[in-house]
Image (cartoon, grey):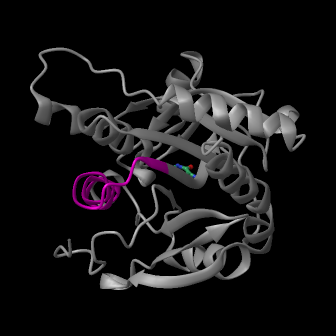
Amino acid sequence: MPTAHNSAAKGDFAKTVLMPGDPKRARYIATHFLENARLVNDVRGIQGYTGSYKGTPVSVMASGMGMPSMAIYSYELYHFYDVENIIRIGSAGAISERVNLRDLVVGMGASTTSRFAHQYDLGGDYSAICSYPLLESCMRTAARLSLTEKTFAGNILSSDAFYGETPEMIQKWSAMGVLAIEMEAAALYMNAAAAGKHALCICTVSDQLLNDEHLSGEEREQGFTDMMRLALETAVDLEK
Ligand code: HPA
């Protein structure tokens, strides 16, 4: 069903959709990894493609940056396009000493600085968590791809203010065992929960915020290959 933000027809999306933040990355994945990829949405340049990977139908569409943007696109995919599984593939800033540049962080839980959960009027603090079947499939796939040593599953923080991440705030979240900061997972997880669907966030560590290390632009491009393979192979594993 076309919406104000998505011109795709019902049936244009596969059961599983990978969502990078960046539309250019969506196009990169579609052209380099998917067979028979066709563009199904380009409203606001939020490119969405559907094709197949090793015979499994897979879609990839950008989420844009931040929770409100992710929330609009994922809500529509779940509710109007019958999508079952959304796997966010993004970048994150590590705030754990165990986690290094280029490592992969899988968000079991997504804490947040946002008030997104208040829309549900629950009267308490909601714990946004990933889908266990997706997590299990992802970790099994990581082992099969020999990525276990660089893959860390745990709590992540979905921040609303990229430039509000102060050293004090980073220390506090780090001391609670949170592994990394990104900006979309909590909205995705809550949308999935409210829709009775499945979501997982996998991030490549592009920044180590504890010691101010950052990947270069070129390394950011290359460093994402492991995450893309992990997400695509997880989409295939889910079909088994
Ligand atoms: N903060 C939030 N999101 C991010 C970061 C960060 O430091 N790095 C990559 N995505």
The residue at 29%/61% (across/down) is 81
Magenta highlight on residue 155: no
Position of 156 compared to 211: left or right? left
Which corner quadrant of the image does residue 154 belong to?
top right
- Left/right placement of residue 95 relative to residue 123 reads right
On screen, 179 above or below 57? above
Q: Residue furthest right?
A: 146
Residue 78 inside the magenta-drawn segment: yes
Q: Nearer the viewer, residue 193 or 213?
A: 193
SS majority, magenta: helix
* Residues drawn in magenta: 70-86
- Residue at x 44% of width, y 52% of height: 162
Q: Is residue 35 left or right of residue 49?
A: right
Q: Position of residue 120 (x, y in %)?
A: 13, 30
Residue 163, position as x, y percentages in the image: 43, 53
Q: Quadrant of the N terminus?
A: bottom left
Residue 181 vertical position relative to residue 175 in the rendered view, above or below:
below
Q: Is residue 31 visible?
A: yes
Q: Position of residue 122 (x, y in %)?
A: 13, 20
Q: How many marks?
A: 0
Nearer to the camera, 212 or 160: 160
- Residue 107 visible within the image: no
In depth, the one of 208 and 184 nearer the eye is 184
| Coordinates of residue 133 in the picture (x, y in percent) | 55, 29
Q: Quadrant of the C terminus?
A: top right
Quadrant for residue 55, please give it. bottom right
